[in-house]
Image (tube, rainbow, N blue to C red):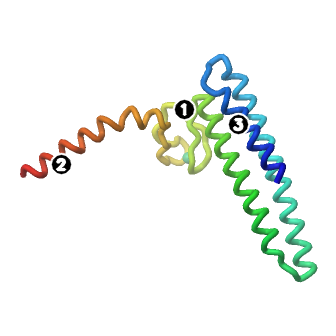
């Protein structure tokens, strides 16, 4: 599990430098390195899991605990990877489609490749939430009067 802790430390390091424009280029290469590292960790765990399953099959004994812990490790790495890709998208001002993984320009509402609606950034949401709530309240009042 030390492998996993290393990855988490790298994630923490990288997020600390996000935000300043001067650090943007450094940030992008940092996050890119992080994704390369997570991918190689993923490959290693997949390989380990495959080998373990092979030996279990040979010995006619299934160690479900071992499979579960490796699956957990893979899930964690996949999560780290999606976080890193999202971060990379923010740094490059692109929006990565959560459906097909395609990169779209930063102001895209829909994915150019698959048409999936691209989730807006948190900042955009908070800026628009107030007006949306007001409109909904007005509507409700009108409904009550009728
Ligand atoms: Zn897409």
State the quadrant of the N terminus: bottom right
Q: Which residue is mark 2?
A: 140
Task: Residue 54: name its quadrant.
Answer: bottom right
Residue 26 at x, y percent in the picture: 73, 23
Q: Nearer the viewer, mark 3 or mark 1?
A: 3
Rendered residue at 92%/73% (across/down): 55
Rendered residue at 65%/46% (across/down): 82
Disc 2 + disc 3, Cβ < 8 Å = no
Residue 144 at x, y percent in the picture: 11, 52
Q: How many discs appear?
A: 3
Disc on res. 105: 1
Q: Residues within 10 Å of mark 2 (few under 14, many from 20)?
A: few
Q: Is residue 92 left or right of residue 119?
A: right
Disc nearer the start of the sequence (2/1): 1
- Residue 30 drawn above or below residue 74: above
Q: Nearer the viewer, mark 2 or mark 3?
A: 3
Residue 13 at x, y percent in the picture: 73, 33
Question: Assess mark 2: CB under 8 A from ligand 1?
Answer: no
Rendered residue at 79%/68% (across/down): 67
Residue 117 at x, y percent in the picture: 47, 46
Disc on res. 12: 3
Instruction: Classify mark 3: helix, strand or loop.
Output: helix
Rendered residue at 74%/34% (across/down): 32
């Amino acid at each position: 599990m030390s492998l996993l802790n290393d990855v988490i430390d790298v994630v923490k390091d990288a997020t600390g430098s996000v935000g300043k424009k001067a650090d943007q280029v450094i940030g992008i290469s940092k996050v890119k390195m992080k994704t390369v590292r997570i991918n190689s960790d993923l490959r290693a765990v997949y390989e380990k899991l495959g080998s373990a399953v092979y030996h279990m099959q040979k010995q006619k004994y299934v160690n479900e605990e071992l499979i579960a812990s490796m699956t957990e490790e893979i899930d964690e790495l996949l999560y780290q990877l999606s976080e890193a890709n999202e971060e990379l998208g923010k740094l490059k001002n692109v929006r990565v489609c959560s459906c097909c993984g395609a990169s779209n320009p930063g102001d895209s509402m829909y994915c150019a490749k698959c048409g999936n609606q691209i989730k807006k950034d948190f900042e955009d949401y908070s800026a628009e939430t107030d007006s949306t709530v007001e409109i909904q309240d007005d509507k409700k009042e009108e409904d009550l009067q009728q």
